[in-house]
Image: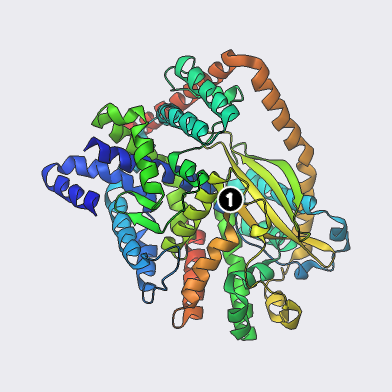
Amino acid sequence: MLIFSKQKGLASFFAPLFILLTLLLSGCASNEVVTAEAEDLEVEVEVSEIDPYEGFNRKVFVFNDTLDTYVAAPISDAYLWVAPEFVQSGITNFFSNLKDINVVLNDMMQGKLAQGAEDSGRFAVNSTIGLLGLFDVATELGLEKHDEDFAQTLAVWGVPQGPYLVLPLLGPATTRGVPGGIFDAAANPATYVGAPIQLLQMLNARANADGELNFIEEAALDPYVFTRESFLQYRKNLITDGESANTDDLLDFEDEFDDEEGIDDTASIKAIEPVDAVEVEAELESADAKIVETDVEESAVNSKDFSKASGSFDGAVKSFDDAANSFKIASDKLNQLEAQ
Amino acid sequence: MIKEFVLKFSNYSKLVVYLLFMSLGLNNAMAAISAEAEQAQVSEASNTAKDIVLNFQNVLLDVMRQGEALSFQGRCKQLEFAILQSHDVIKSLRTIVGSKEWKRFSDEQRAELTTVFTDFIVSTYASNFNAFSGESFVYVSEHTTKKGNVIVRSILQIPEGKRKKVTFDYALKKNADDWKIYNIAADGVSDLATRRSEYRRILADEDGFNTLIAIINKKIDNYAKK
């Protein structure tokens, strides 16, 4: 609430600054329509262990969502439409590269030394050959990007997750994520270079999340619950480095049907039987013939070998090619604009 | 003031990364559709869990390649068949809803919800897998759990732009002779678990069943209109 009230103060004195600040909001945004649905559902809130403050959280969620709809989304849409793709990816790469410093620190604190070495290599390569991080040459070289942060480190150290929170402007978090966020911010050079860079960082982040936010808007029946569940599971997956999904957890739910034979599902089965199965099957068979599984595997292996062998030069050339290509697209767009 | 900016951004950036993966994931992480409908197919019986997943992914890629040449309805038609063949949609739906609730439904309600749920999954796929830009699925591993179920891991590689890859874990159960997809997790976000929370929340309200059907139908309409 402290942060929130300060933001309000800012809003009255530095209105334009506040507008840009709200770019942060996208995190918890969804859309107006579904928000209305979510509000309707707010009637009886079961107090759950993980989300004891659901009533409050939902209000903040709606607040964030509204600000995103009216402020952050339009700015982000304009940026996505106008900025050439190579500019967008350059900016994304730049901030991603700065974040690699943080990743290395957290690698070390979690005892992931080999990964720490790899991530140091990423930073070194991208900061030099990659022109201060504007090009992600390291990935082309086979140095994989990792995602580590201090909240994950705290989890690895055994700090409990704590309740789920939706913070004004900041979006989903857990109580463990709050000190994590402070540490990560302190370790990121972008923190110390002034407001314009930070605003750009926010714009970039909001723009990169655009597709995902649209997805939530379309797919979630209850955007609040959808966001909460996905956020918590995604964080868990990061903490376990992808192993959380590789267990019976994906299959076991506490009241899964053991007695399913006892239930007559004939009606339900009939309900989803495809009518023109034979016709579609013929189409599908031809589809299968066109795409052979091994092609996909081989090409993936080949391209990995290739990019490793070809060294930094090819990586860089590829990045520049991509850049040139998106520049073309951008100039087409500008022509379109002129035509209009 | 800078510190507050920083704090905000830092949390925000994590969220963004999460959303990015989540959404890509959930595009795929649609639950499951029925085995029983196709049990007559003897040829399916010999398919391994891995075959089921790879075949389904091939259909997805093919539908993407045909992209706009197919209408939304055209994509739906192809995808519905593939989904019904490879997924155990009823088992997934029962798990999402919960056994107690499912038993409370009448036959008509079960049939109605199953139809609507299936349409929703098909529409979500058809809406999101509508164009091809060099995506590919790379098989990673297959892993048998303690209970004899199989988890097939594969990576969706997206060549363009900044979104590089999403890990998909397909959980399959053996149903009679056939392996059927029962759950999908995208970067650790389990489709069934997320839906369980959503659906049960809605069903807990008064007249929850009708509300649920209405919300899902609205979502399907939105996809069709897009």
Q: Is residue B37 left or right of residue A24?
A: right
Q: Residue A165 at x, y = what percent?
A: 37, 57
Dot 1, how many residues are within 10 Å of its Cα: few (below 14), some (14-19), or many (20+)?
many
- Looking at this view, is B154 or A243 the one in front? A243
What residue would you read off at disc 1? B188
* Picture quadrant of residue A14: top left
Residue at x-position 65% and y-position 42%: B155
Can you say whether A50 is above or below B54 in the image? Answer: below
Q: Does residue A203 appear anywhere in the picture?
A: no
Q: Residue at x 46, y 44 (%)?
A: A154
Residue B174: x percent and y percent?
79, 63
Q: Chain of mark 1?
A: B
- Residue B51 visible within the image: yes
The kind of residue on which mark 1 rests is Gly
- Rendered view: A228 above or below A48: above
Specify whether B91 is left or right of A160.
Answer: right
Residue A182 percent across, percent down from the top left: 34, 40
Q: Residue furthest left?
A: A13
Q: Residue furthest front?
A: A158
* Camera-nearest residue between B16 and A102: A102
